[in-house]
Amino acid sequence: MPGKPARSEPQASEARRPVLEVRDLVTTFPADGGRAAVVDGVSLQIAAGEVLALVGESGCGKSVTALSILRLVPRPGRVASGSIRLAGRDVLSLGVAEMRAVRGALGAMIFQEPMTSLNPVQTVGEQVVEAIRLHERTSADAARRRTVELFERVGIPDADARFDTYPHQLSGGLKQRVMIAMALSMRPKLLIADEPTTALDVTIQAQILELLREVRDRFATAILLITHDLGVVNELADRIAVMYAGRVAEEGTREEVLAAPRHPYTQGLLASIPSRARPGEPLAEIRGVVPSAGEWPKGCRFATRCSRVLDRCHDVPPEAIALSDTQRAWCHVVAREEGRA
Amino acid sequence: MEGYVVSNAVVVAVVVGGVFAAWAVRRSRFWSESFRELARRRPLALAAIAVYVLLGLADAVSWVGDAEGLEGVAAHQPRTLLDRAFPADFKERSYSAPLADVEFYGAAPLARPGAHWLGTDILGRDVLLLTLKGARVALLIGGLTSLIVIPLALLFGMSAGYFGGRVDDAVFFVISTLASIPHLLLLIALILVLGRGPVQVCIAMGITNWVGFARVVRGETFKLRELDYVQAARALGASEWRIVLRHILPNLMHLVVITFVLLFSGTVLSEAILAFLGIGIDGSWGQMIDQARDELARDPIIAWNLASASAALFGLILSVNLVGDAIRDILDPRTLRENL
């Protein structure tokens, strides 16, 4: 059966390799006169059971990166170059049918808006059953049993009765749980969570994060968490990649990036969290706005807003500076501090 | 001879389809509750439509035989259930006023004095029977045309809206071309080419009418295509056609229902205009109205022919429109949530 994914039984040789390896990904969209790279040379790796948080402001290309991984970039956007390996498969070279077999089975995605991510005219159970039967020939009964099991596993109370309800009869938190159940239905090796908690109440947010942590631990799922909420990152992430204007600015473990950020952008981002401000003092901010794709500076992309900008920042794109085995920053200022400029 | 067999088969198909539709409505909570709400809001109009449908079905089932009182060829013609509700030779020689005992002109005694409740027409045919028989023609026009229009519009509208690009360009070219030809002219030309039978007229009206709904479907599909659950289905590995059939089409069904109702009344009315131009369908109310035009000029005036056909037409269109408005209210996405 071509393109039929194997069920998840990690083999010794493959367990070593990262589940997801993205190298020099470039995704372009048409802009006046040509194509602008919205994602410009991003490289990422996630191992099984690891949560990588992709952090950045709106429009920095983090969602497009995620969509590129499953080749879901809406037309007329497209992946222009780079390589993506997902569970040993070269995603960019797969045919349309093979790619469909990968989506949902090897790499699944949950979206920001649980309110609109479910089809309003189908019961939630039917939708999960459909997700299962897209990839597996099972009887309707077996699929239903599995769906109810999944519902129980993601913490939907009264799972059997919930099977026959319509999305609008469920709360936002329950809908997001249904979405997670749907995404987990084939035990994917990679789960992409695009702002999974942004649309939810704070209490529900904590529950969903707890659920994602459980998923990671129990199934050794690699999770790509896309968010701009550093609180969520602190809760869940093992490693962090900070994106700015289509490029990774800094990456490292959670402790490194949150406790000892080196890139001025990461520092600014962390300083602007309101809870870190002292009462009575104005909130810290990063002045200016992210330039839009196509108008990016030719040197360091953060140069226009950086408070510690050097002359060469405007002309030369920075190289990666390794700060530890795991932490790297793309910054001339860091390079100078490290004495490597 | 074969015509009535086909017609009987169609009745069987319609009844089976109706039973299946009723079963499907009962099975889906959404549709059964919508229907219940409709019955609560418009009981009379629904009942009127039911009467028209029953009349239409009664006039579509026919068989040969039991022709007491008829002679020659007429005795071997199939007669419908509705015909059989009246005496076989329920005819006079010419006009008779409603419930009259003598002919309208000349006062010769009638064969069946006082039996023609709505009078007779110029050929002495009973107007009540003619009017009741018109229900079948009206339902055929409205129903068949809608059945042609809706699949056509869905096919073209959904592919244009969903796939976009070249498909959209091609479909939109066809739509714009059809829309730029004067409606009536195209209709007349098609009827001249296809012929004047009832099915042919319906096909002609179908071809001229699908454009509007196709545009609506295209726009709606365009919107649905970008919705998160379509994206989510794609992210789960669903194929394009699966997405169209499982996620787009079901979300267009409220439009289909509303359009069916509006198209139905629209085409029944436009057939009346075709009849006026002399290319209508035999036995339609439009044709009765057209034939009655001259009678209005007579002195004393003959109005019963026109009046009963118009009243029947008016009753059907009014009930269909009332039901259509109610359906639109019930299925409106903005009020949808509260109704469930």
Image: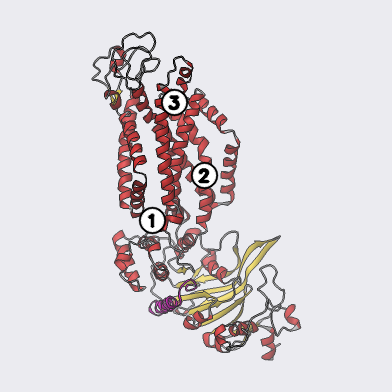
* Residues at marks 2 and 1, CA–CA distance in whole angstroms: 28 Å
- Amino acid on which the number 1 mark rests in the picture: Asn
Q: Could you say which is closer to the camera, residue A9 or residue B136?
A: B136
Q: Is residue A87 visible?
A: no
Residue receiving disc 1: B339
B243 on left or right of A295: left
Q: Position of residue A87 (x, y in %)?
A: 47, 72
- Amino acid on which the number 2 mark rests in the picture: Ala
Q: Which numbered disc, 2 or 1, marks the residue closer to the eye?
A: 1
Instruction: Identify which residue is drawn at 51% across, 35% down.
Output: B207
Instruction: Please give the chain letter of the residue carrying mark 2.
Output: B
The stretch in magenta equals: A196-220
Mark 2 and mark 1, same subunit? yes
Q: Is A218 inside the magenta-drawn segment? A: yes
Q: Mark 2 and mark 3 in contact (Cβ < 8 Å)?
A: no
Residue B146, numbered circle: none
A29 on left or right of B73: right
Kindly indicate the quadrant of the structure image that contains residue A155. bottom left
Q: Is residue B90 visible?
A: yes
- Amino acid on which the number 3 mark rests in the picture: Ile
Which quadrant does the N terminus of chain A fall into?
bottom left
Residue receiving disc 3: B281
